[in-house]
Amino acid sequence: MVDTSNYRHWITNGLPIFISIGIFSIKALWDSWLLELHSAESLQAFALVFPIIILANVIALALTNAVMGTASTWMEKGHIYAKVLPFFLLAALILGVVMSLLLMMLLDPLILWFDAERYRIKLHAFTVSLIFWLPFQYTIVLLGQILRVVGRYKSSSLIQILACVVGFGISYWLIGVKTEIEPLKSVVYSNAAIAILAFSGLSVLLFSHIKKSKAHDTPLDFGAIYKRFAEIFYTTCLSQSMAVVFIFVLTKILAQQGEKTIEIYAYLTRIEQLILMLSAAFISVMIPEINKMKMNSNTSLIDEYIHQGTKFLLGIGVILVSILFGSLTLFNSFSTLDGKLDQTLLMFVALWILGTAIQSTVILFSQLLNVLYSPREAMRLNFIRFVGLGIPMIMLGNNLGGILGLASSLLLLHIVSLYISRRGLFTVIKASYMLNSAQK
């Protein structure tokens, strides 16, 4: 029987992580509001860069997974083998530069895909500015995850929170005061400032930790570390690329629904990221514990732990959906703004947020497969989920019922994904247990 203290452990360590990464989503909402005050066109362009941000986030997730999946090879009892850090940091910086250049090269195809020629100047300003942000963003993702692996949840989170608070002020100054700068470029610059501040603070924290830990000089098998790191990294990228394709198709469909829908989409995507980041924070605490159970071949305890984690994430999701939709409905009832939502758009928002809450649990199963058990199985299931089922479902839903049909098909997709990902995970866990038993 899994001890109920797990809830306390998840909340105690997960909430600081969520606050540190979730505040970035709140900043995205803040930026959306500032952009809307600047012009409706700026907000609409910001909605269309969401798939670009998701594409960039794939690399961040891959780095996070690779760190979690290889941690046992470069640390011992919480002590970091310092010699691996230059390798990790160089990889993150190079990936940031390469990704920035790639997104600049993809600008014209993206404009053509979204039929967004009228947003060209704004989208161009956003993409050319990424070179100042992504290299530092990937390094703070890397450093933050390493610090969490060694148990520095609260201190690393506090540094990121403080950096983001400063970023709010920078964002307001650049968008609201220095109006001569293109607004979407200002968003990237403020994000870059956050990343640079966080990088400085996390570097000091990490290297002081290594010094206190008296890091070992034991020779490391860099070949084995690189091989495992690369395997998790590229399978995560391939797996998540399915989601990116799906989001590009989804965004294209919504971009054809009119300016009001695009503006709602800008806010919805940022709210969705906030919900998913809460789940990701708890999941990042759960995975190391499950890895310990896996190393001890304690399958029954793993099963109970995952079941408890699933209920916990679903419960948190229901609470968040209730709070968010209740607040939106109340605000909409008393609002006298021109942007007041009609019943169709309110239902669209409700279905979207509910689907996101379910999706957060699907991420738990996907992450466990990708980091601890079978990255290739995670990739296969993501292909089924996003390409085999997702794209046909949202296209059919949109053709049959417009935006409500689209939102309903999204909700159904998340429910089906929950089933197939859960079944896939436990099938792999059972097979792994039987293989280990046979070898013994």
Image (cartoon, rainbow, N blue to C red):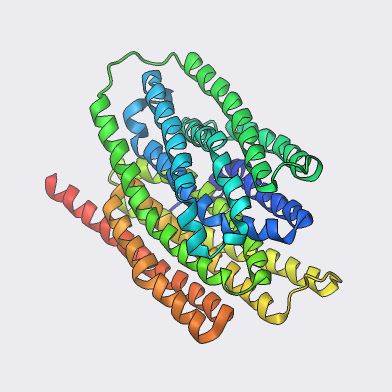
Up-down relation of residue 81 to residue 40 (above or below): above
- Residues 63 and 133: in front is 133
Q: In which quarter of the image is the C terminus?
A: top left
The single residue placed furthest to the bottom in the displayed view is 400
- Residues 68 and 179: in front is 179
Is residue 275 found left or right of 291 in the rendered image? Answer: right
Q: Where is residue 385 in the image (x, y as percent from the top left)?
A: 37, 67
Q: Position of residue 240 (x, y in %)?
A: 39, 54
Is residue 269 found left or right of 334 in the rendered image? Answer: left
Answer with the quarter of the image where residue 92 lies: top left
Q: Quadrant of the N terminus?
A: bottom left
Answer with the quarter of the image where residue 339 lies: bottom right
Q: Position of residue 111 (x, y in %)?
A: 52, 58
Is residue 354 found left or right of 84 in the rendered image? Answer: right
- Residues 331 and 136: in front is 136
Q: Where is residue 50 in the image (x, y as percent from the top left)?
A: 56, 55
Q: How many marks?
A: 0
